[in-house]
Image: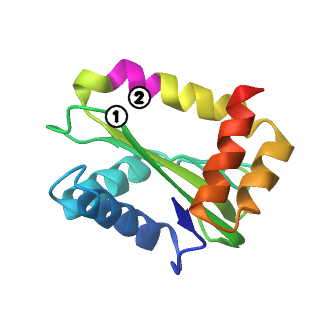
Amino acid sequence: MLIDPAVADRAALLRLYGSVFEQAGIFGDGEEVARRLLERERVLSTGIGGGIAVPHAQVPGLGRLAIAASTHPGGIPYPAVDGRPVQLTFCLIGDSRTAADHLAGLARLARFACRAEFIAGLIAARTGDDFMARLTRLEGE
């Protein structure tokens, strides 16, 4: 969970996610993760509107689904369907063996994204623990 990381744009954010997954020991090559995320973005931006983006990619050899999130209260430039800056991202990586989990995760995030109070509450989180507590409350509703 990244609270308002210092990134200037989508590319910088995706590179940061790559390094986060590497530092967490989820995948050994953060540059490969970032490259795959950027490749996926070139096909179609994952900026879904409402200040939300859900970058995702398949990373061969990962063997599981992994997710990270970031808040950007001031917004960052990110091509989105509504042209608005992005304030909240969820980044999913998986591989072909986790495709069903990957799709289920995307669907769940899409359902949450329709709830304005959900988005505002997560963006307002001051710490990673605060973010996770808000997310856990929402999932319990």
Q: Amino acid at mark 2?
A: His
Q: Amino acid at mark 1?
A: Leu
93 in relation to 89, above or below: above
| Mark sitting on residue 102 | 2
- The residue lying toward the viewer, choosing from 115 and 39, is 115
4 in relation to 98, above or below: below
| Residue 127 seen in the current view | yes
In the image, what residue occupies the spot 29% across and 58% down? Answer: 24
Q: Which residue is mark 1?
A: 65
Position of residue 52 measured from the top left corner of the image (x, y, whole percent): 66, 51
- Residue 84 falls left or right of residue 93: right
Most frequent secondary structure within the magenta stretch: helix
Disc 1: CA contacts within 10 A as few (<14), some (14-19) or many (>=20): some
- The residue lying toward the viewer, choosing from 50 and 97, is 97
Q: Are marks 2 and 1 in contact (CB under 8 Å)?
A: yes
Which segment did they paint magenta? 99-103
In the image, what residue occupies the spot 25% across and 32% down? Answer: 95
In the image, what residue occupies the spot 61% across and 35% down? Answer: 109
